[in-house]
Image: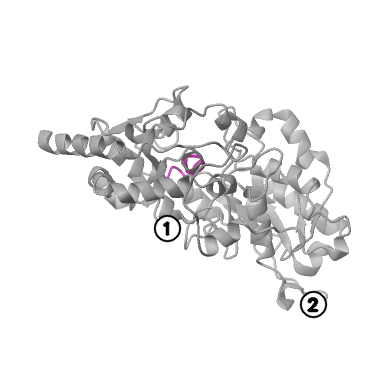
Amino acid sequence: MPNLAFTMISWVFLLLLPITIAVGKLPQAAPITSERISGSAGDVLEDDPVGRLKVYVYELPSKYNKKLLQKDPRCLTHMFAAEIFMHRFLLSSAVRTLNPEEADWFYTPVYPTCDLTPNGLPLPFKSPRIMRSAIQLISANWPYWNRTEGADHFFLVPHDFGACFHYQEEKAIERGILPLLQRATLVQTFGQRNHVCLNEGSITIPPYAPPQKMQAHLIPPDTPRSIFVYFRGLFYDVNNDPEGGYYARGARASIWENFKNNPLFDISTDHPTTYYEDMQRAIFCLCPLGWAPWSPRLVESVVFGCIPVIIADDIVLPFADAIPWEDIGVFVAEKDVPYLDTILTSIPPHVVLRKQRFLANPSMKKAMLFPQPAQPRDAFHQILNGLARKLPHQKTTYLKPGEKILNWTAGPTGDLKPW
């Protein structure tokens, strides 16, 4: 083993010489030299949704949104905050229409994850109840829900498992997607192929990461990337999963047990004040699944030019039709975690350099962020692009008079209680 460790350290030393590449600035900064993105991904990133769709925003009582935020301002900075910023964006967006008769899409501004425990987790039993209450309200006061039962409506559900509204997978699967949302388009952070919590046609988005906070932690772009592999976070969730076998399907536990003493791996449960700076000094950033397949590390890695090592089988990545994830990331199967050192040290330096050049493209970073104010080709616009690509609605979207598809009384008993 000493010989293997020496070989890997030598490899990293040689690799570091040619790849002290600039992490660059966040989108509001001057553009940097980067590899051009060609093909459909680049075309989508350049799309302008204005003029291609109109969105009507329902006006709901503040108890569904603003009062929740006033009660707990943490909602503005946690990873589910896209639901808040998308609402604010749409209120002033050029795609908004005040005439519902001309709308292509209807948006219900509900903040289902802005009801937090002291530890900052969304209360899973309240999310479906607030959403159900909001749908009952719009269906009783406007005619548009009833004519399609939500098929021309979209909802932001940036929960761990989307509209299944639970952070533990087995409980999310048991609950399933809220029955009243089965026909709607779900805009959600959760994405995993062949999963009961992902509807066909859902739009997968990045989790929220504060752009201003990341901007404040930029380091000089010529800083060498002297860390080979970087990760900060939980390996075992002792509060919810004492044995650690179910949490992250055991992948994080495997990372710790196999590489806690490996000099190439800078991994820890500590969350230092230099976290963002450290990511800018790293070549590879581990992005393993946790309770859900996704985490803010995906955003942070792309923004800071650290090659994301994605460990989450069957993950559906944010804006996968717009961002060339295969070109910027490394995918490792959960079963192959024990071989991470061999996998990463076997990647040729020229491949690493190419991935870094793709990551240096400002379009990559813009598409992953929800900036205030909004900017061209940012995550807000990627969501609108996704909605525009689903137009025009098919004739089957509209129901015949009196026709019903959804079962209003379906779902767990607790979800049917008034909110």
Which residue is depicted at the point 77% across and 64% down? 104
Reading the image, the residue beneath label 2 is 400
Tell me where the magenta segment starts and ends, as one range: 289-299
Residue 231 horizontal/vertical position (percent) = 38, 34
Q: Secondary structure at mark 2?
A: loop
Q: Is residue 189 above or below residue 386?
A: above
Q: In which image quadrant can residue 113 be found?
A: top right
**Percent coordinates x, y for residue 336 in the rendering:** 27, 50
Q: Is residue 296 magenta?
A: yes
Residue 106, image x, y percentages: 77, 58
**Kind of residue indicated by mark 1:** Asp
- Where does label 1 land, which residue? 314
Image side of residue 418 versus residue 197, left or right: right
Please tell me whether residue 84 belongs to the stretch shown in magenta. Answer: no
133 or 290: nearer the eye? 290
Screen quadrant of the N terminus: top left
For disc 1, the neighbor class at 10 Å (few under 14, some 14 to 19, many from 20) is few
Residue 247 percent across, percent down from the top left: 40, 42
**Image color mode:** one colour
In the rendered view, does 71 fall on the left or right side of 320? right
Residue closest to the far top: 273
The structure residue drawn at horizontal position 34% and vertical position 47%, both measured from the top left corner, is 352
In the rendered image, is residue 72 in sight? yes
Q: Nearer the viewer, residue 331 or 62?
A: 331
| Amino acid type at image mark 2 | Lys
Foreground residue among 157 and 410 = 157
Give above or below for 206 relative to 54.
above
Q: If the image is split into quadrants, where does the C terminus sit?
A: top right
Secondary structure beneath label 1 = loop
Vertical side of 363 occupied by 304: above or below: above
